[in-house]
């Protein structure tokens, strides 16, 4: 059976969309958890989430995206469509989804949980945009 293949451009597009859509989903959850917060608390919570986002982006996700971009660039002209991530990354995604479900069910107050979701969600959007910036290079 032949593997489903696609041009590298499509792999970058899929990867970027996946990262950005998941990031937007996490930020949307955080938004709903913060709707009833008072202005001062809201500023503190959002600012904390954004600081966390930049740390996660620069020290974590950005490096993963760079590795993925390098790996995709080294692939043949029409690689397997699932090759936008390494198999190790698929495992990490499953672990992160499981952790997210458990966090939402945890007793942690949702406004504090929003900090984590803003941090990860915004970092995913920032890092995912690197895929779009590389679309012209393939």
Image: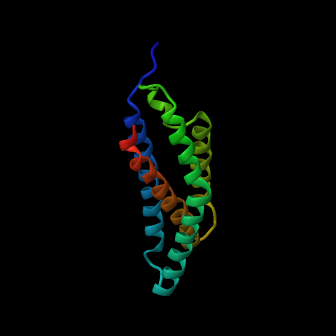
Q: Residue at x 46, y 49 (%)?
A: 19
Q: Residue at x 39, y 41 (%)?
A: 137
Q: Residue at x 54, y 47 (%)?
A: 66
Residue 47 horizontal/vertical position (percent): 52, 76
Q: Indicate whether 5 appears above or below 64.
A: above
Residue 58 horizontal/vertical position (percent): 58, 60
Q: Indicate whether 132 appears above or below 48.
A: above
Front residue of 79 and 94: 79
Residue 96 horizontal/vertical position (percent): 60, 49
- Decide if residue 110 is in sight here: no
Front residue of 79 and 124: 79
Left or right of residue 6: residue 99: right
- Decide if residue 83 is in sight here: yes
Q: Residue at x 50, y 29 (%)?
A: 75
Q: Indicate whether 109 appears above or below 81.
A: below
Front residue of 136 and 95: 136
């Amino acid at each position: 059976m032949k593997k489903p293949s696609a041009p590298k451009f499509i792999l970058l597009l899929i990867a970027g969309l996946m990262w950005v859509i998941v990031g937007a989903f996490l930020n949307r959850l955080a938004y709903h958890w913060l709707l009833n917060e008072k202005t001062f608390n809201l500023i503190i919570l959002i600012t904390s989430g954004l600081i966390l986002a930049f740390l996660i982006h620069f020290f974590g996700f950005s490096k993963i995206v760079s590795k993925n971009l390098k790996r995709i660039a080294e692939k043949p002209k029409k690689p397997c469509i699932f090759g936008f991530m390494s198999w190790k990354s698929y495992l990490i995604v499953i672990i992160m989804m499981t952790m997210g479900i458990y966090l939402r069910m945890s007793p942690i107050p949702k406004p504090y949980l929003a900090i984590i979701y803003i941090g990860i969600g915004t970092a995913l959007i920032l890092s995912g945009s690197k895929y779009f910036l590389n679309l012209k290079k393939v």
